[in-house]
Amino acid sequence: RKEVEQDPGPFNVPEGATVAFNCTYSNSASQSFFWYRQDCRKEPKLLMSVYSSGNEDGRFTAQLNRASQYISLLIRDSKLSDSATYLCVVKGGSYIPTFGRGTSLIVHP
Amino acid sequence: DTGVSQNPRHKITKRGQNVTFRCDPISEHNRLYWYRQTLGQGPEFLTYFQNEAQLEKSRLLSDRFSAERPKGSFSTLEIQRTEQGDSAMYLCASSGVTGDTEAFFGQGTRLTVV
């Protein structure tokens, strides 16, 4: 079993739609959680950290469920510019970021 | 530019040749990571430095791969006797002293072995 698992998609949604991605992790001792965004042939960039109580940044909401060992990302009112790959990232005790394979999002007009 | 810098951006080499990549992290960051990414996959961890000490290596890092961070600043990743399977994007990232902070990535070095 991979340490961090994501559905690769692609998720193909119209502009304005709400879309949600989930990610599961296997190490119950994981301590820090993030969502990164990666555009085609570019480096990953931090989208948002994920806090235990859940957090929101504009149209983006991240949630953490430690009991079930998953994190989620909700994107409301999707824009064309949201088209990208979304990478789930988990850090354990050694603080080495471990990445999922990413979920591809395509937002169409 | 105070971000993570990687050189070269692209490298084409013949099978069997040695290649070396360089990463200059954000200056105040003491943690430096190397990853490899292939098409359709997320970045796969290769190795990690805290200052000049190489603290962890993935089993993906065969004996043909070696990494150094001699003065705790820039780092190099060398691949000896390259194989076609080494073709990938090699990404470097750095992060600060507090372990739970985000990692910042360089633009990567794209290696093609022909």
Image (tube, rainbow, N blue to C red):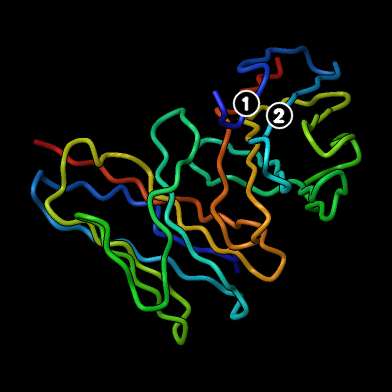
Residue beneath label 2, please?
Answer: B23
Separation of residues labelled 1 and 2 (CA atoms): 6 Å
Q: Nearer the viewer, residue B31 or B61?
A: B31
Residue B77, labelled with which disc? Answer: none
In the rendered image, the residue lying farthest to the bottom is A67
Tell me the crowding category of disc 1: few under 14, some 14 to 19, or many 20 or more residues within 10 angstroms, Cα based. many
Q: Is residue B82 left or right of residue B3?
A: right
Tag 1: residue type? Ser
Is residue A68 positioned above or below A101 on the image?
A: below
User: Where is residue A39 drawn, in percent x and y?
Assistant: 39, 34
Could you tell me which chain the residue with mark 2 belongs to?
Answer: B
Q: Is there a contact, CB below 8 Å, between mark 1 and mark 2?
A: yes
Q: Nearer the viewer, residue A32 or A3?
A: A32
Which secondary structure, mark 2?
strand
Residue beneath label 1, please?
Answer: B5
Q: Is residue B20 left or right of residue A98?
A: right
Name which residue lies at 59% across and 38% down. B37
In the rendered image, the residue lying farthest to the front is B28
Q: Nearer the viewer, residue A52 or B47?
A: A52
Tell me the crowding category of disc 2: few under 14, some 14 to 19, or many 20 or more residues within 10 angstroms, Cα based. many
Query: Going from the N terminus, do you reach mark 1 or mark 2 first?
Result: 1
Tag 2: residue type? Cys
Name which residue lies at 59% across and 73% down. A30
Image quarter where the N terminus of chain B lies is top right
Q: Is residue B67 visible?
A: no
Is residue A15 positioned above or below A58 on the image?
A: above
